[in-house]
Each structure stands twice: as structure tokens, then as C-alpha cells.
Image: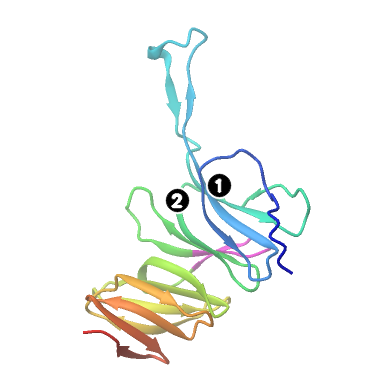
Amino acid sequence: MDTGTVTELLADKVENKSELRVSADGKKAVYIINITGTAKNDADSTEDSLTVDYSKAGEQLYQLDLSVKDAKPAALTTSGDNKLYPEILADGTVVYLSADPDGKAPNTLKTLKPGGTFAEIPLDIEVVWAQEGAGGLIASGTASDGTARIYAVTTAGASKELFRTNRGISEIAVSGDGAKLGVISDGKVLEIENGKAVQLTK
């Protein structure tokens, strides 16, 4: 029953949180914390002595158990890659886009199983976007031949191509049941269902 009451779940005073996602059952939340550099200087606090330590800076994933009162956030990652689009799948797996901060390696999708095992989802695209859909994941990116492609990915990591185009994809929307996609490609709005694209605008 909706009561209109606001309940504070976490007050850890940690700043720079973003991309909050809550599991379908409402029991888990995952989010990104952007950890900044740590300033250091000597006892005199002179400007010349000021240094900034960036060794632990970067984006890290945290998870909060919403079913436990006064639960503390748990760090899920410690790696130096950039992290985007975190999602919690139906089986509790956390999926996120991993990007090399130096741009020397292609973006990939990574999974973290509830038991703590990391894996990479093999796709023939460099992933640029991902969102939960139909109990799994919808991901899009660019293949080596320049085509833009959209895949459905199951919780087991199996993938199925839903759409490809030579014209690029600028935006994607996923229906609540994951059965339909709205796509903006080359300035036109398309609806994708059962592997077929219907152009809705000219």
C-alpha cells in the first residue's frame, strides 16, 4: 500500500553516486560511485607541497541490500575500468559496460554473478549502450564492418541479434516486457518486433 512516507535507506555521506538501479523484486540496489583523487600536503599546508593521489580514483560499483535494516553498501568492483549502465538481472547477476579509461581497448559487457564470479559476454560489437529487458539485457554497439547492431542477451550470456543497420542508431527504448524496441536510426523512428523493423516516421 502506498503511504506517501519517505524512508531513508542510506546516509553514508559518500558523494558522487550515479546510475542507481533497483532489482525487480525490490531487494537489491546497485549504483556507481565516482571516487576522486585524494589531496595531500605537508604539515605547513603550503601550495607547493600539495599533491593529489589518483591511484584509487575511478568508478566502482556498489550494492545495497534493501531487505536488511541498516545494511552497509558492499563494493562489487575495484578495477580501474570505467563502468556504465549497471543492471540487476532476474537471477541477481549484475551486468555493466566496461570501458578502458585510456581508450586502448574496446568496450565490453561484463557480468558479476551473485557468488562473486566475473565474466565477459562475448559479442561481435563494441558495446555503447545496455539496458535490462525481458529478464535479460538489450545491448547495442558497432561491429567491425561498421554496422550498428542490437542484441538480446540472456542471463546465461547467450545472445540473439534483434536488429542491424548501416545507418547508425542514436537512441533505443525498450518496452516493459522487452518484446518491442523503439529505435531512432538516421533521424527516423522505427519499431522492432520479432526481428522486423517498421518505420513509424519519414
SS for tag 1?
loop
Q: Which residue is mark 2?
A: 81
Query: Could you tell whether 180 is left or right of 32 in the image?
Result: left
- Crowding at label 2, few (<14), some or many (≥20) Cα neighbours within 10 Å? some
Q: Residue at x 65, y 40 (%)?
A: 12
Do labels 2 and 1 touch, CB within 8 Å?
A: no
Looking at the image, can residue 120 be seen?
yes
Q: Is 52 on the left-hand or right-hand side of 71?
A: left
Residue situated in front as seen by the camera: 20 or 101 = 20
In magenta segment, residue 152 = no
- Indicate the amino acid at tag 2: Asp
Task: Identify whether 48 is placed above or below 182.
Answer: above
Residue 144: mark in rendering: none
Q: In the rendering, at what x and y percent does residue 104 appear?
A: 32, 53
* View extreme (front): residue: 4
User: Which quadrant of the rendered structure holds the N terminus?
Assistant: bottom right
The residue under the point 42% across, 22% down is 51
Where in the figure is residue 102, as x and y percent of width and height?
34, 48
Span shown in magenta: 110-120
Name of the residue lying farthest toward the top: 44
Say above or below: 194 vs 172: below
Q: x, y (%) of residue 16? A: 50, 43
Q: Quadrant of residue 67?
A: bottom right
How far apart in space, not on screen, are marks 2 and 1 (Cα)? 9 Å
Task: Check disc 1 and give the amino acid type.
Answer: Thr
At 68% from the left and 60% from the top, the residue drawn is 4
Q: Position of residue 93 (x, y in %)?
A: 61, 67
The C terminus: image quadrant: bottom left
Q: Which residue is mark 1?
A: 78
Front one among 32 and 6 = 6
- Badge 2 element: loop
